[in-house]
Amino acid sequence: MNRYPLWKNLIVAIVLAFGLLYTLPNFFGEAPAVQVSSGKATIKVDASMMGRVESTLQKAGLQPSGVFFDGNSVKARFRDTDTQLKAKDALSRELNPDANEPVYVVALNLLSDSPQWLTSLRALPMYLGLDLRGGVHFLLQVDLKQALTKRLDSTGGDVRSLLRDKNVRHAGITRSAETVEVRFREAETRDRARGLIADQLPALAIAEAAEGTDLKLVLTLKPETQKEVLDTALKQNITTLHNRVNELGVAEPVIQQQGADRIVVQLPGVQDTAKAKDILGRTATLEARLVDGSLEAQNAIVGSGPVPFGSELFKVGRGAPVVLRKQVIFSGEQLTGAQATFDENQRAAVGIQLNDAAGRVLREVSRENLKKPMAVVLFERGKGEVLTVATIQAELGSRFQITGMDNPQAANDLALLLRAGALAAPMEIIEERTIGPSLGADNISKGFNSTLYGFIAIAVFMVLYYVLFGVFSTIALAANVLLLIALLSLLQATLTLPGIAAIALTLGMAIDANVLINERIREELRNGVSPQMAISEGYARAWATILDSNVTTLIAGLALLVFGSGAVRGFAIVHCLGILTSIFSSVVVSRALVNFWYGRQKKVSKLAIGQIWKAATP
Amino acid sequence: MEFFRIKRDIPFMRHALVFNVISFVTFLLAVFFLATRGLHFSIEFTGGTVMEVAYPQAPDLEKVRTTVGGLGFTDTQVQNFGTSRDVLIRLPLRKGETSARQSEQVLEALRADDAKVELRRVEFVGPQVGSELATDGAMALLFVVIGIMIYLAVRFEWKFAVAAIVANLHDVIIILGFFAFFQWEFSLSVLAAVLAVLGYSVNESVVIFDRVREKFRERAARAMTAPQVLDHAITSTISRTIITHGSTQMMVGSMLLFGGPTLHYFALALTIGILFGIYSSVFVAAAIAMWLGVKREDLVKPVKKKDDEQPELP
């Protein structure tokens, strides 16, 4: 009766082998590495970078223990930090000839030292949270109302120019908190305006109202438009943050949306929070200017003369070098949107929307400067980079296109850069956490040690108290650790210090199942049941209890998972996973061991489960 | 080795009233301290800034206090954290100031005094996050209580569900009472510990109720009265109860000893929870179930059919 069929034993063996395999990467530790990734949205790192990195290292006489390409970045692994630092210097010099204008991010990183075959099985070490490896965590609240306000501002302008273009007379346009109101004197004009707006501005919901003798159209953004505005605003902010973080040279930044209007920024390994905050909070500016096509300007470009008065020479970017007038036609704050699109000839183009004021200025400037080139420049850290130089083909307004893009990808990149110039909506830091690297290392060792010593104490007690069954229980508990760590590695769930505490606590609680089983077996023996029968009965009777008690613990774990955030969440994930693995290991694995030991013996006269004390019969 | 050599069932239920009075008094004390002293919430709930800095030698805390106070912060706290060389500085929220600048200001001022000071950790929590966390915490507690009650009511009977939840909520209040009395810091991880304890110590009641049900179903035990059955259930599981909690406490104790200051209050909350968990789920829960009048019929009738199918063998 105490024999597992082959398939059950196989399952136990397979699960344990799987656990061992995925736990393995955690033992190899991490090796110093240098990571090369793109520092600019216009440049992409591809497989050819691998060759460049390899040849650069070879030239510098440095021997990497491996060079990898993961789709976005190239990582080179080294044996010691000394070589790593040298390699970083060599690579920065080679890839970024102008140190003030870095094209690539060359950052120090740590790479798992596990062999290639493990990595290719997607067996990676556990992903450590910031409290264990050190770094900076920011939670930013995006003021999305501002994004809607911006959009409504430009809507007011759009309506005004639409009605003016079509010669519809209105008695004033006013803008309130969430609506734009247009007044009319006559019902007929109102109806015409209504038709026009519905036709030309599909993003608006229109309602009619009357106030005194005036007739009104009340315009609001349709819900789907609002949603789109908010989504774009959040995405744009994330893109902008990405660009800024790239400057910091962080190896694995995390920039994610959290909830409806929040963004999490995690920068592992960054110590200089002041600089990080500075860069994250900076506002980049975008300016459109006319190209100075004079002879002096041409001379200035080749270097045979001074830059003309009232103009500026730009050396970096597309279409550079170029001399631009200092006068600004419109700036980034006036830009309300930019997307990749197609022109009438189905060639890639970028559609740009400006607010009303900028549209009016541009209309005038473009009328006077037809067939002349205009440039858009992105200013960051006081330096300008030319994004595009295009010829003005017609009179432009608040909506126009930049055509003649090489391909849709180029159009996409330009649209992104145009948008990324400024934040779509202001952000505020509402949570900040900085953990120094020494504290991170401390936390790991403290968490690890307390788990280890606790485990040893439990193991010693179990073996003393339950003898052989204590050994089985301890092995089952060890299997539990193995499976839990394997699962955490496989899921790449973030392990934090509360997570380590959860591992410890889960182990402390998991032993409950084995105590229940062992006590039941003793009780059966005390009642005079035969040893084989006692094992079988003990497991069977304990099972219902184990299930019940784990379900109640799991309910608490799930509540923490659903409602918890931050520290609590890190705890809850590990806790819930631990409960699941503990049911398997403490019941199935320990039974397999017991069956293996006793099941094969024909006659068992005594179980090594410690002394069984019986009350003397009265 | 066998720790528990019990000849016959211990008449726990005869003293049920005493147990209930003891727990009622501790409960009232806990409520009293919660009401008068209140919990010392961490900045995760209240909002504010916490900085942990490390010095090569133990610094003069008074001097650090004056330096921080000199920056115009009111209501700051400066204390040692773990060792005498580590200092924890708490700054309250200040209106109109960009949050994150505070920590830089303070660090600059401290650096001016002693250039070797090292920043270990900064945590800043805005006011909106804090109130959200408090609501989420309350929601989680509610979810756990309702979830466990439904489960126990389905699995056993409503009287057991009520008894178990009352017993364990009283645990929670007592843990909170300790935190209020000693003004220990109540942080998110302590909340996690409290909820984990709630789920864990309900186990205790479950194990006993399982025994009660088993005994009620036994034909041979027909003659036993409800208190006798409860006594038997507690007596026959007491060995398991002590050993299990002892093992869990070994782990928690190890965290308390080796886990450092970050895990200190987490482990402390667990320790109190485990100790009172044993007491309340064994004595209080069983006694309440008895007062509520559990009968054989409550458990035997509805589950009769289920009983025929053996629980699945592992």
Image (cartoon, rainbow, N blue to C red):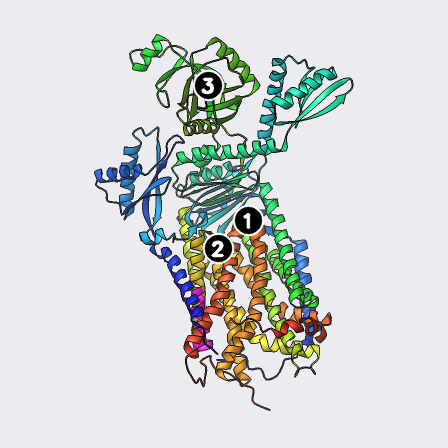
On the image, the x and y values in percent for residue A455 come to 44, 66
- Give the amino acid at mark 2: Gly
Residue A264: mark: none
Q: Residue tagged by mark 3? A: A288
Whole-angstrom CA distance, mark 2 to mark 1, is 13 Å
On the same chain, marks 3 and 2? The answer is yes
Whether residue A582 appears in magenta in the rendering, the answer is: no
On the image, the x and y values in percent for residue A17 come to 39, 63
Closer to the camera, B116 or A260? A260
Q: Residues within 10 Å of mark 2 (few under 14, many from 20)?
A: many
- Give the amino acid at mark 1: Ser
Q: Residue tagged by mark 1? A: A565
On the image, the x and y values in percent for residue A509 come to 52, 65
Looking at the rendered structure, the secondary structure element under dot 2 is helix
Q: Residue tagged by mark 2? A: A499
Are circles 3 and 1 on residues that touch, CB within 8 Å? Answer: no
Residue drawn at the location 50% of the way across and 13% of the way down: A395
The chain ID associated with circle 3 is A
Closer to the camera, B59 or A90? A90
- What residue range appears in magenta? A460-479
Question: Viewer-nearest of labels 3 and 1?
Answer: 3
Mark earlier in primary sequence (3, 1): 3
The chain ID associated with circle 1 is A
On the same chain, marks 2 and 1? The answer is yes
Q: Is residue A322 visible?
A: yes
Is A91 above or below relative to A501?
A: above
